[in-house]
């Protein structure tokens, strides 16, 4: 475990670990009950221990962020998220929205993006609409917080548009309510004014974030503009001497910065024209399920593991099932076709069912970019139509098949390397290589491909 700060050591790392594990256990126990049902603690003492651990975790997380210790940030944020999402939401509307926003921030910092989006979708007690208060500062705070949560949830373009609409409506209401609010706080008008300034800058940063997710323009400049307003917000709230709200803005600030850097626009900006077109397609308004950001494992594969590095002939990506490896494969396919337009790609999957599934997915995603996806289903021989398809010089860009069928095609000299070079081999579920019989067959096939096809690349 990375070196922790003194407060964690004084409180006890084991107690923090126990609190997180206990919270996870309670969550699992409640999975099959009504989602908004009150989670039952074993004793009141257990609940108090959870709150005590949570205070320590939050302090430790602040320290980790300031020290830029990524491992500790991930550890403490994940623990905070585990605890926050099983604590009952406060009855007071303002306290409730603070609790929800902090939960979202901890999830983002702890790389639990998918979990928090599901939580925001399923929990009916989470308010994601505008509320009206007699107090302008409360109204401003609440709607700004909701706008932020909409950018976290991102259920298509509608959430992002609604986020911007909330901020726009606040601008329209400012002239109407601001003067009255300041008149009502004449005894502390400076602090009240600074509080409003902090919220205005925070709202602007969230609006810029929502716009950026929609159009992806100028990622670096957008982050600079967002940071400018976040810094002004932090400065104003610090001068207003509102410590609790200062910490609240601190969480949002760090979450927003990470959201920008996890966005598909930031990670894949200016890679090549094929991928740029694909990103625009993935984020398009007419897309049924637009993708605005990548999951942390996908980001690491692209930024740290060299997925799109043309120099690396073999890239191994270790990711859990259903964690987005197919999308990464599509990026690699587009990179291959960009570097060598005449090449073709072999996509190896273990079963006939997956041949159909992957073929349909690739056709849906890549056919609009002009790519031809074909499949060769398992069999011990070729039918005439299939043979004509495979031997044509311009028949397909990607061939989806099983390792047994690809082995048959190569040994039968049906896939020649003279006119159309094999540029990339993708092995889906490559962890099966560890299985004795199937792994040996896969290893022998890849060895033969490496021998028969010069300069071929591999994604495992």
Image: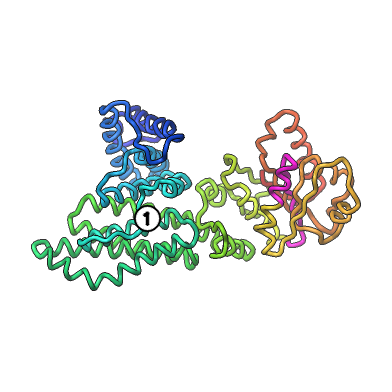
Q: Nearer the viewer, residue 173 or 325?
A: 173
**Image location (x, y in percent) of residue 104:** 38, 48
286 horizontally vs 2: left or right: right
Q: Secondary structure at mark 1?
A: loop
Q: Nearer the viewer, residue 178 or 331?
A: 178
Q: Residue at x 68, y 43 (%)?
A: 428
Q: How is the image coloured?
A: rainbow
Q: Residue at x 66, y 40 (%)?
A: 429
**Image location (x, y in percent) of residue 418:** 85, 56
261 horizontally vs 6: left or right: right
| Membership of 353 in magenta stretch | yes
Residue tagged 1: 128
The quadrant in which residue 144 appears is bottom left
Looking at the image, the residue that sits furthest to the front is: 34
**Magenta-highlighted residues:** 341-359
Looking at the image, the residue that sits furthest to the right is: 384
| Membership of 37 in magenta stretch | no
Q: Nearer the viewer, residue 68 or 31?
A: 31
79 horizontally vs 370: left or right: left
Which quadrant is the N terminus positioned in?
Answer: top left
Q: Nearer the viewer, residue 274 or 144?
A: 144
Residue 49, placed above or below residue 216: above
């Amino acid at each position: 475990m990375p070196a922790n700060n003194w407060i964690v050591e004084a409180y006890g790392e084991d107690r923090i670990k126990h609190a997180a594990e206990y919270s996870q256990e309670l969550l699992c126990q409640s999975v099959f009950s009504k989602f908004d049902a009150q989670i039952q603690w074993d004793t009141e003492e257990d609940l108090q221990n959870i709150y005590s651990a949570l205070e320590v975790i939050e302090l430790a997380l602040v320290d980790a962020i300031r020290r830029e210790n990524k491992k500790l940030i991930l550890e403490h944020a994940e623990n905070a998220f585990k605890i926050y999402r099983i604590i009952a939401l406060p009855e007071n509307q303002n306290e409730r929205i603070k609790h929800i926003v902090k939960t979202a921030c901890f999830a983002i910092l702890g790389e639990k993006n998918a979990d928090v989006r599901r939580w925001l979708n399923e929990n009916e007690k989470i308010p994601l609409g505008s509320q009206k208060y007699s107090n302008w500062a409360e109204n401003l705070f609440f709607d700004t917080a909701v706008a932020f949560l909409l950018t976290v949830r991102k259920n298509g373009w509608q959430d992002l548009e609604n986020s911007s609409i909330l901020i726009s409506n606040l601008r329209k209401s400012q002239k109407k309510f601001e003067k009255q609010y300041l008149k009502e706080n004449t005894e502390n008008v400076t602090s009240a004014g600074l509080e409003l300034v902090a919220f205005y800058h925070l709202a602007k940063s969230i609006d810029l974030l929502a716009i950026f997710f929609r159009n992806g323009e100028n990622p670096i400049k957008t982050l600079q503009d967002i940071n400018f307003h976040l810094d002004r917000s932090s400065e104003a709230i610090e001068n207003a001497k509102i410590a609790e709200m200062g910490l609240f803005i601190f969480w949002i600030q760090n979450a927003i910065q990470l959201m920008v850097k996890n966005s598909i626009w930031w990670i894949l900006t200016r890679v090549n024209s094929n991928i740029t077109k694909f990103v625009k397609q993935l984020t398009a308004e007419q897309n049924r399920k637009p993708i605005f950001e990548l999951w942390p494992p996908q980001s690491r594969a692209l930024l740290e593991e060299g997925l799109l590095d043309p120099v690396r002939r073999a890239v191994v990506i270790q990711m859990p099932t259903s964690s987005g490896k197919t999308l990464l494969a599509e990026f690699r396919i587009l990179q291959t076709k960009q570097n060598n337009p005449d090449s073709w790609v072999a996509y190896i999957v273990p079963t006939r069912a997956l041949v159909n599934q992957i073929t349909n997915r690739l056709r849906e995603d890549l056919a609009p970019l002009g790519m031809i996806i074909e499949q060769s289903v398992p069999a011990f021989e070729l039918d005439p139509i299939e043979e004509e398809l495979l031997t044509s010089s311009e028949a397909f860009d990607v061939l989806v098949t099983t390792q047994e069928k690809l082995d048959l095609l190569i040994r039968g000299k049906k896939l020649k390397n003279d006119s159309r070079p094999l540029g990339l081999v993708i092995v889906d579920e490559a962890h099966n290589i560890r299985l004795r019989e199937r792994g040996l067959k896969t290893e022998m096939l890849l060895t033969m491909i490496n021998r028969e096809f010069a300069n071929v690349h591999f994604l495992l």
